[in-house]
Image: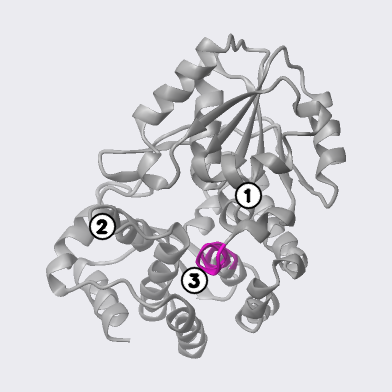
Amino acid sequence: MNKQKVIFSNKLDKTLVTVVSACERDRLFILVDTNTHRWCLPLISNFDCMQGAQVITIGATDENKTLDTLAEVWSALQRGGATRHSLMVNLGGGMVTDLGGFAASTFKRGLNYINIPTTLLSMVDASVGGKTGVNFGGLKNEIGVFSNADTVIIDTTFLKTLDKENLLSGYAEMLKHGLISDNKHWAELLRSPEVLDKPEEIAGLLEESVAVKQHIVDEDPTEKGLRKALNLGHTVGHAFESLALQRTPILHGYAVAYGLICELYLSCIKTGFPTDKMRQTVSFIREHYGQMSITCDDYPTLFQLMTHDKKNVAGEINFTLLGDIGDIRINQTATKEEIMEALDFYREG
């Protein structure tokens, strides 16, 4: 798999000209959703290097991250005369970069693509690392491939288009990166949520967070070992997210935050994670993310959803836990009773 270039830019026009010029292309396509078509496409559509590009627009939100939408993108590429020498620019949040990356990687057996993430979540997580895919059968990211974008261009100008809830969604993944890196980065994130009120000041923290993910992905691009560290909070988090899809969908970062509460609890009882650090992190999450309402009646459904997690081995639910900040313990298991305890802890606070 080709190594991915990540560029932090404060002059998007010049950066995009350089990146697009370096890519072989006979035709250029831009994938957006209905939100980024309105708010973000105007920021790049007048650039000289974007002239003549064919725009493909899909529905917004994770509900549209489906095989049907994927087929719509393939059809648009086919109608537009795309070849293996074409280039696609994915302009949007994680749904656009995940689905667009999968569409580009599979059409004609693969064409080059560039990610321009427009949400904090996609900047720090989805657009970087080469995971692409769509939801299927009620499960998150069930179908997909590892395939790196040629380049990821991160420009915090797009963050000005976001509301506080979407900024918090991305911040949850940054908090996860702090937990798997070191005490300094973790503590800085706990005391710096005010940067979300001034997105232009988040660049330093964002670069540090992306560097954590890049280092891990470079070491283990296809998740055979160390990359599983990035799944902290996601085993339970994806179950929360899938349950919410059946009711009122929640943002991915909120689901991860709720998953972190449960998995830090498991880390305390299973791998000795310090209780004081768990409580500091959980207190931060409760203050800023609130709580998804669940009852004991939801436990069997949540447990069943966890059994479908892609990390599971030999029928056992697989967790990434921590012995301390930065002390990563991959391939951990928990009994059904321990998982129920973690859900009790989540509900009871």
Mark number, residue 118: 1
| Three-letter amino acid code at the position of disc 2 | Leu
Disc 2 to disc 3: CB gap under 8 Å? no
Residue 297 spot, x, y in % from top left: 12, 69
First-in-chain label (2 vs 3): 2
Residue beneath label 3, please?
322
Element carrying mark 1: loop
User: Looking at the magenta stretch, what is its main secondary structure?
Assistant: helix
| Residue 68 position in % (x across, y down) | 35, 28
Whole-angstrom CA distance, mark 2 to mark 1, is 26 Å
Give the SS element for disc 2: helix
Q: Residue at x 43, y 47 (%)?
A: 61
Crowd around label 1: few <14 · some 14–19 · many ≥20 (10 Å): many
Viewer-nearest residue: 167 or 274: 167
Q: Closer to the camera, 68 or 163?
A: 163
Mark 3 element type: strand
Nearest to viewer (mark 2 / mark 3)? 2
Percent of width and height locating residue 34: 50, 40
Query: Residue 48 — which label?
Result: none
Q: Quadrant of residue 304?
A: bottom left
Say whether marks 2 and 1 touch (CB < 8 Å): no
First in residue order: circle 1 vs circle 3: 1
